[in-house]
Each structure stands twice: as C-alpha cells, then as structure tokens.
Image (spheres, rainbow, N blue to C red):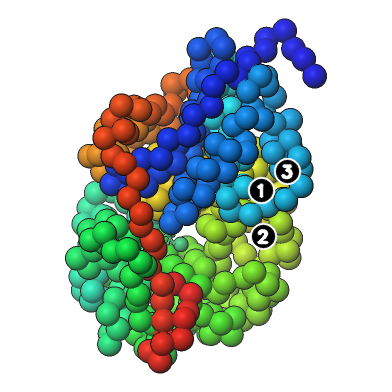
C-alpha cells in the first residue's frame, strides 16, 4: 500500500489533563507538520487508556502513512488479537479521529465533507433539566425553552432518596470531582420509590409546556426488563422522544421484552464499544436510537459504520454528549451528525467550562437550539498544550448506587 501523497507519522503524544475534569488527548504529528487530535477519555479509568496508548499503540504508528485510516483501524483492531473492550476501543478511536483530522487538514476540507457532505442545516440537540423537585426541574426546563431549546431531558429527585440519577443538587462538577473524594461517592436507589414518583414529572411537564416540546428521560440502567416495560407503558401518554437506558443489556434479548410491551421509543448505547454490542437490538428493531459515542465506539470510522447499519432498520443515531466527552470527541461526532442520513438527535450539555475552553478551542456554534458545525479544515478543534500543563490529572470516579439494604446496583 503506497501513494504519492504519503503523510508519514513522526510523533505521537498522549496528554492527560484536568481542566475541570480529566481528559486524555492524543496528538499525532506528521513529517509535513500537519497534526491531528483525538480523544481517548474513559471516565474514571483515564490512566489505563493513556498507558495503553503510550506503551502499546504509539510505537506501532511511527513511520506509517496517516492517510491509511482504514488500514490503521484494522491493524489496531484485528492486529492486537484482543478485540473490543473500552480501553482498546477508546485508543483506536483516538487514533482514528486524529487521522480524520489530519486528512481533513491535508485536503483543506472539514471532516463532514469527506464523509459525503451535509445532510441538514444544523444538528438538533437535547439539553438537561434536573432538579430536586418536579417544580425545580420544570423551572429549569422553562429557562431552557426560553433559550430556544426544543428537546429537554427531565430528571428529578426521587422523594425519600437523597437525589437520583441526573440530579446534581449542589454537586459542583457533574457527578465526579466531588471535593477530591478518594473513592466513588455512593447514591441510594429504590425502584419502588422511583416508579411511584416518575409519572408526575411528565404529567406536570405536559401541563406546563403543552405537546410540542420534545421530552426525554434517562433511567441509567436501573430497571429489570419487565419493570422497564411497565415504565415505557406508563409514560406512553406523555409522548417521549425517547426513554434512555431503561435496562442494562449485556444480554441484548432483554430489549425484546421491553419492546413487546410499549410504544415509547427506546435508546441505548453510550457505554458500547463496538457494533457487536448492539447488533441484535438494531437488527431486530428493538430500539429506535443508538447512542454510541465516537470515543467509546472506535472513532469516526466505526460510528459511520454503526450509523449505516442502523439505517437499514430505521434506527437513528443519538450520540452520547455528557461533559466527560472532550471537545474533540464532541466535534468528531458533530461531523457524523451533520452528515448521517439517519441522524436523530445529539445530547448537549454546553461547550465546557472556562478552564476547558482555555485548553480546547472549537468552531461549533449553538444557534436557536441547533448546533452548527464550522468549516475549518479537519475537525475544527485545537488543543493548547501549555494551558493543559497547568491542569494536572486529578483522580475522580463516577458514583456507585446501592439499594436501601446495601446491595450494589447499577448507577
Ligand atoms: O453517566 O457520561 O446520558 N448521559 C449519561 C452520562 C453518563 C456519564 C458517564 O461517564 O448517562 O451522564
Ligand atoms: Co445516559
């Protein structure tokens, strides 16, 4: 394999920084001076992926032609013998995304043009409204509606439990970095209390906002299949755009049970590493949205393949967009979103903090609740290594969940 426009990889650098939260950034530089950026952040396991990249991936890249994205992807997937897995796939993703960035810069085109061009004017997003009471949550949703957002994920505390998934209360930085706690914080869970209180949130939301606003909800894998089926049925009158992660599905057949009982649209996939994790549920049309993220599912190359496969079964993409996805990951999937014929919706939680904006710059814009992808060549993101050096890694974990009797549960 050769070409007369080779771009030889000369340097591969892995930078772990914490501008508000931990990110693993990959920088691949070619002999021509063109460089590309990738993200390999696996929330709570950042050093594992950084070490994997430094020790086992970087040495294999030096001297290769950066244009050969597909061959390098296959080399890192099939060639390692140990396929799949979050650390491996996030590493492949970081390389893949950095190579797409390089190819775009070399071609003087934004990545979406390389994928086939824009399919829409902008990328539709949904945002989060969370609160300790139904009223607090809906007040927050009202503010977001006022800012032009047309789709809102609602999460409200479960009465009798100290918070619940998605409810931040006085927590400063999403769910982690909680006062430098050395170990994961613990949250209580009761399915009974949740099932007894959740409907009210959507009853009141429809009363307040009418039927036009898109509403969503994330269950964070806390239910069993038959409980999830009951929740889906319970929420049918409130016309959700989707119900996310109603049940964990390492066993994909679990979704058949949910699907058989409800017409509430179903979404899953933010923790999936490859198309194999969701193949059965897509193929059997048990879900409506696949939420794989560019970092966690193997990069632009892999996400594009998942999107094309999903399209055959009327499944649309809705990539994960929480704050632990770096601006590089976010930019990468925004290029997929603006291109994919079967794009559904993109999760959006803001363009980062003051610190993260000092480290990462990007050319995405939010206008009237719609994300606009800029036309800089490549991904349109940049990374300031000097600024990043001011914010060293800070160990941090997602919380864990326990039932009221102490049994460990899905968080
Ligand atoms: O818990 O990103 O839809 N969003 C989510 C997130 C995830 C975190 C995990 O790292 O479920 O809040
Ligand atoms: Co989620």
Q: Quadrant of the N terminus?
A: top right
Q: Is mark 1 within 8 Å of ligand 2?
A: no
Label 3 vs label 1: CA separation? 22 Å
Farthest residue, direction front = 55
Q: Is mark 2 within 8 Å of ligand 2?
A: no
Label 1 vs label 2: CA separation? 9 Å
Horizontally, residue 82 falls left or right of residue 198, namely right
Q: Earlier in the sequence, mark 1 or mark 2?
A: 2
Q: Picture coordinates of residue 76 (x, y %)? A: 69, 38
Q: 211 or 113: which is nearer to us?
A: 113
Q: Picture coordinates of residue 237 (x, y %)? A: 45, 77
Residue 399 can be seen in this image: yes
Horizontally, residue 288 falls left or right of residue 161, namely right
35 versus 190 height, above or below? above
User: Which residue is labeled 1 in the image?
Assistant: 306
Q: Earlier in the sequence, mark 2 or mark 3?
A: 3
Farthest residue, direction right = 1
Q: Nearer the viewer, mark 2 or mark 3?
A: 3
181 versus 408 height, above or below? above
What is the number of callouts on the image? Answer: 3
Q: Earlier in the sequence, mark 3 or mark 1?
A: 3
User: Which residue is labeled 2 in the image?
Assistant: 278
For disc 3, the neighbor class at 10 Å (few under 14, some 14 to 19, many from 20) is: few
71 versus 169 height, above or below? above
Q: Residue at x 35, y 75 (%)?
A: 186
Q: 183 or 29: which is nearer to us?
A: 183
Q: Is mark 3 within 8 Å of ligand 1?
A: no
Q: Are marks 1 and 2 in contact (CB under 8 Å)?
A: yes
Q: Picture coordinates of residue 243 (x, y %)? A: 49, 68
Q: Residue at x 65, y 80 (%)?
A: 257
For disc 1, the neighbor class at 10 Å (few under 14, some 14 to 19, many from 20) is: many
């Amino acid at each position: 394999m050769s070409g007369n426009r080779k771009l030889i990889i000369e340097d591969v650098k892995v930078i772990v920084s914490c501008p508000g939260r931990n990110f693993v950034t990959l920088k691949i530089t070619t002999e021509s001076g063109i460089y590309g950026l990738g993200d390999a952040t696996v929330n709570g396991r950042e050093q594992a992926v950084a070490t994997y990249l430094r020790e086992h991936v970087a040495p294999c890249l030096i001297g290769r032609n950066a244009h050969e994205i597909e061959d390098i992807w296959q080399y890192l997937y099939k060639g390692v013998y140990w396929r799949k897995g979050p650390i491996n796939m996030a590493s492949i993703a970081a390389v893949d995304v950095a190579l797409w960035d390089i190819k775009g810069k070399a071609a003087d085109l934004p990545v979406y043009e390389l994928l086939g061009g824009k399919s829409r004017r902008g990328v539709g997003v949904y945002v989060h409204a969370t609160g300790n009471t139904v009223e607090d949550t809906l007040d927050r949703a009202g503010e977001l509606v006022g800012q032009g957002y047309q789709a809102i994920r609602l999460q409200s505390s479960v009465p009798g439990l100290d918070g619940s998934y998605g409810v931040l209360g006085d927590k400063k930085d999403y769910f982690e970095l909680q006062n430098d706690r050395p170990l994961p914080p613990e949250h209580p869970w009761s399915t009974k209390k949740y099932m007894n209180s959740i409907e009210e949130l959507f009853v009141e939301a429809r009363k307040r906002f009418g039927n036009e606003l898109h509403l969503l909800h994330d269950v964070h894998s806390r239910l069993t299949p038959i409980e999830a089926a009951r929740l889906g049925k319970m929420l049918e009158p409130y016309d959700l755009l989707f119900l996310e992660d109603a049940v964990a599905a390492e066993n994909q057949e679990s979704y058949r049970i949910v699907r058989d009982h409800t017409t509430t649209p179903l979404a899953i996939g933010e923790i999936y590493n490859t198309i194999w994790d969701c193949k059965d549920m897509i193929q059997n049309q048990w879900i409506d949205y696949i939420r794989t993220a560019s970092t966690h599912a193997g990069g632009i190359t892999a996400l594009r393949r998942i999107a094309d496969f999903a399209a055959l079964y009327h499944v649309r993409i809705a990539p994960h967009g929480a704050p632990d996805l770096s601006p590089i990951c976010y930019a990468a999937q925004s290029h997929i979103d603006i291109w994919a014929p079967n794009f559904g919706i993109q999760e959006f939680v803001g363009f980062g903090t003051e610190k993260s904006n000092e480290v990462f710059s990007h050319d995405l814009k939010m206008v009237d609740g719609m994300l606009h992808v800029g036309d800089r060549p490549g991904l349109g993101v940049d990374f300031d290594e000097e600024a990043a050096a001011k914010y060293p890694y800070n160990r941090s974990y997602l919380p864990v969940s326990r039932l009221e009797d102490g049994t460990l549960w899905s968080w």
